[in-house]
Amino acid sequence: MKPFMDEDFLLDYESSRILYHEFAKEMPIFDYHCHLSPKEIAENKQFRSLTEIWLNGDHYKWRALRANGVDEDLITGNGGDREKFNAWAETMPSCLGNPLYHWTHLELKRYFGIDLLLSGETADEIWEHGNAMLNQNDFSAHSILKKFNVEVVCTTDDPADSLEYHKQIKLNPGVETEVLPTFRPDKAIEIGKEGFTEYISKLSSASGLEIASYKNLLQALENRVDFFHEAGCRISDHGLEQLFYEQTTFEEASAIFEKGMNGQRLSFEEEKKYKTYTLIHLGKLYHSRGWAMQLHIGALRNNNERMLKKLGPDSGFDSMKDFELAGPLNQFLNHLDRDSELPKTIIYNLNPVHNEMIASAIGNFQGAGTKGKVQFGSGWWYNDQKDGMIRQMKDLANIGFISHFVGMVTDSRSFLSYTRHEYFRRILCNLIGSWIHKGEAPADYEWMGKTVQDICYYNARNYFDIKRG
């Protein structure tokens, strides 16, 4: 029987242990997609308590607390920090088998040096020890990024954002990590959602261009792409409940935009046409500037109407959507590719039923000059766990090239999430190590180790057009 979470945690074979300890463990982190706050980085946030750094904004933990019957006041409400922490400690034993059980104890070990299992019985000791460490000056946002050797962080930013905090970070020699914005124009694409016209007004102010027509909108978006580019942005991101492809023209999209701005109800077909034309236009902009485009597909959001009214969006009430993806995905990529305007693209899916389809689709649109130009992104959200990561990597390896995979992202709002890279690296090394152990891959550690290091770091560094400094 192996001890819980020892130095060989998740490493079942000698070959796995060699790959992790000698090749993967010390690689820098290239976190090309996350939701960290640029403001907290710019201000070198010092956290007041374990509750603030560990529980605030973490939808995974919020859902676990609700599943354990905890009152909302101790989750997102006005409960005290200590009471909220106690609720989380008492919930932890019920998380057995959930990735939160592993993530939590990795965070305790790597950030705080705590080997205790979190529970109601150990809550006092962990609370006192963890808070004592947080009160030290070397437990700030900057020191965490330095401690975990985070070379690059790409935050997620709205086109109307001033990027003022990114500017502050760039001028601060104390920030050793390269912190760059990512262009996320979801609100300009979601024409059928409440608040669309108000957002267009906000975008108009940010771009310095009156948006009185669809042509103006496209120009305003291009202005913001250029603004982000000047700030070092080289990646876009799109959160899409469903990817659509509907043949349309500029004239049709313009009429639909005008109708939406006038508050008229749009048909489903009209929404699809508007979204298709706008996303393709953006894809061409990204290609012309050498950006990579991320597509996060398949989150069915804000399903609990009662809690949406009480807490607002992004409060932990999202789940997987089921829909047809193969046709629209291939048509969308083909539209951009036929005129040689397809940018580097990473496709993440929330529903694992699409894994093999995506792994096969990306092979249709690879291109000269970039290894793995179109990527099947890492296990995302509900797939960001041991079985989900293994499924994604096996499906990619079976149908495409795992050797060109750009690896893991935190996709997190928490500074405590950098242990997820360790979790991923251990799982990756165990997968490749199992192939060596079974004689399915050669025991050539120079070759296998290089492949592991590429997936952990070098592939991402080479894929994105990000120059440090």
Image (cartoon, helix red, strand yellow):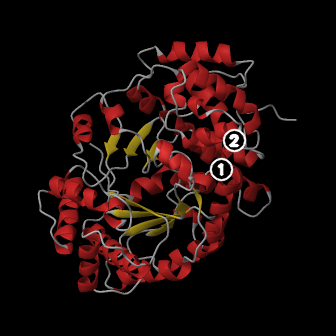
Q: Quadrant of the N terminus?
A: top right
Judging by the rendered image, the residue that carries numbered circle 1 is: 385
Q: What residue do we see at 12% from left, 61% from top?
A: 209
Identify residue type, mark 2.
Ala
Residue in the foreground of this view, choosing between 324 and 42: 324
* The C terminus sits in image quarter: top left
Examine the rendered structure and indicate whether residue 415 appears above or below residue 315.
above
Q: Residue furthest right?
A: 1
Q: Secondary structure at mark 1?
A: loop
| Amino acid of disc 1 | Gln
- Name the residue that disc number 2 marks: 67
Tell me what residue is drawn at x 21 percent, y 34 percent: 171
Query: Image quarter for residue 204?
Result: bottom left
Rendered image: mark on residue 184: none
Q: Is residue 38 visible?
A: yes
Taking 88 as reference, is 66 above or below it? below
Q: Quadrant of residue 7?
A: top right
- Residue placed most toward the observer, 162 or 462: 162
Is label 2 in a helix, a strand or a loop?
Answer: helix
Residue drawn at (38%, 28%) of the image? 142
Q: Which of the pair 151/106 is nearer the observer? A: 106
Observer-side mark, 1 or 2, equals: 2
Q: Residues within 10 Å of mark 1 (few under 14, many from 20)?
A: many
Answer with mark 1 or mark 2, whichever residue precedes in sequence: 2
Query: Does 266 appear above or below 134?
Result: below
Q: Position of residue 409 (x, y in %)?
A: 50, 49
Q: Is residue 372 visible?
A: no
* Left or right of residue 409, residue 100 in this image: right
Q: Position of residue 369 (x, y in %)?
A: 37, 72
What is the CA distance from the residue labelled 1 to the residue labelled 2? 18 Å
- Mark 2 surroundings within 10 Å by alpha-carbon count, few (fewer than 14), some (14 through 19), many (20 or more): few
